[in-house]
Amino acid sequence: MGRSSGGKLTHSRVLQAVKNPVYAGAYAYGRSYDARGVRPDGTVAATWVKRARAEWTVLIQDHHPGYITWQQFVDIETKLAANHTKAGFRPPREGPALCQGIIFCGICGGRMGTRYGDGGRVHYLCQARDANRTTTCRTVAAVTVDDAVAALLLDAVTPQQLKLAVKAADELTERYTRSHRAAELAVERARYEADRAERAFSNVEPENRLVARALEGRWEAKLVALADAEAALATARAARPPLPERDALLALAADLPRLWQHPDTQARDRKRLLRTLIADVTLLPETQRDEVRIGVRWHTGATDEITAGRIGPGRTPAAALDLIRRHGATHTSDQLAVMLNAAGLRTGRGHRWTKGSVARVRDAYTIHAPRTVAIQDGEVSVKQAAAELGIPADAVYNWLTHGQVPARRAPSGRWCIPWDPDTQAIYRRKVADSFRLKPVPPSPAASQPP
């Protein structure tokens, strides 16, 4: 099937196959039509317009052996439509953000996107913030929302809750059954009328051509009405998919927390499970700075509002923040991390302290790092060396980071460069060998070695 026309099986050819009813053993005609219009300049524009399946001219199922069944064809068609992002759908995608695609901003009403940062940090960011730079919209750590929503989901999917849900589903099934009865009676009445029209046409004498033609037209009209009634009944029956078995649901509820937390469970599987019950999530306007209000709308139409504490520097324990403030001016971030871990203190998320986590607390609370003058006689700083060479300081930092030039790292983390003639020759050779750097003569105000 993939190489019938002499070409390779590509993505577009697969889509052509699964979208074509011929591969499902059906014959179809009139799936689209040529629409023509006149442009303002007088030329004719022609486009192909697809028709809905109910408007196809001819559709004969089981016309010939197919590669897939008609039900598989319909399921594939439904799946492809649900994955069509340009039509507004948001299928589960890769990444750990649990509410990706179904989370909205409660301030501007826009959809919130997902942003992945360094160290695996994920945030939900209001799209209006990027487009308009508004001050009312905001960003929030994904783990803050995801943990709260996941806990709400697991609390809802319990054996007790499922028993109530199954009971409500049984009542709903009875309601659907009563509504289907009207469609079934309509089919029976249409079939009876079609049978009467057929008998009337069969009993007419052949020489009564006018009467036969009128009865034949009436019979055809009754057959069309019967087909419409049967289609309406099939639509009514397909409106509610069959529920899983009750025992299977209760077993899933008992085992769901373990499956949810299992390391082999993929993030996409968790998203699919979440979306079977939850329609969307909205970040409501906060009433307190360190809390996030989350609105959850279930597919049943019910809503819940939950509150979660923000993580990050704003949730740093008071004892840890006090230690960083007392020793921040005299100790580096590495030294402070060692002190915090030795004291048994943890970050706002309960993790061990690292140089990066201490640096983020410094930035949030404007706690300056020590600026001890560690440059000795015969040494220069990175900025002084860059000024002497007439190049940006970033280039020197890049060489030092990759160990391409000699330098000394002070305990405070500051780079100290021995500015003797041999070292200067190495740095000037690096500049000469670079095709990006174009050194300029040092200005008279350039710093001199101490």
Image: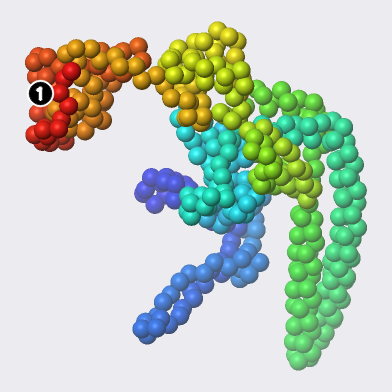
The residue that appears at 73% across and 26% down in the rendered structure is: 257
As drawn, 356 above or below 422: below
Q: Is residue 50 above or below residue 335?
A: below
At x 69%, y 43%, the residue is: 287
Give me the residue at 51% from left, 31% from top. Answer: 364
Front-lying residue, 319 or 88: 319
Residue 139 sits above or below residue 42 on the image:
above
Please provide percent x and percent y for residue 234: 77, 59
Instruction: State the image coordinates of residue 249 (x, y, percent, origin top left).
Output: 80, 33
Counting from the top left corner in percent of width and height, residue 18 is at: 54, 51
Where residue 91 sits, quadrant-wise, is top right
At a point 75% along the width and 42% down the height, the residue shown is: 305
The answer to whether any part of residue 434 appears in the image is no
Pick whichever, 63 or 208, lies toward us: 63
Q: Is residue 136 left or right of residue 281?
A: left
Tag 1 residue: 429
Instruction: Say whether residue 152 is visible.
Output: yes
Q: Position of residue 240 (x, y in %)?
A: 78, 52
Rendered-image quadrant of the C terminus: top left
Helix, strand or loop under label 1 = helix
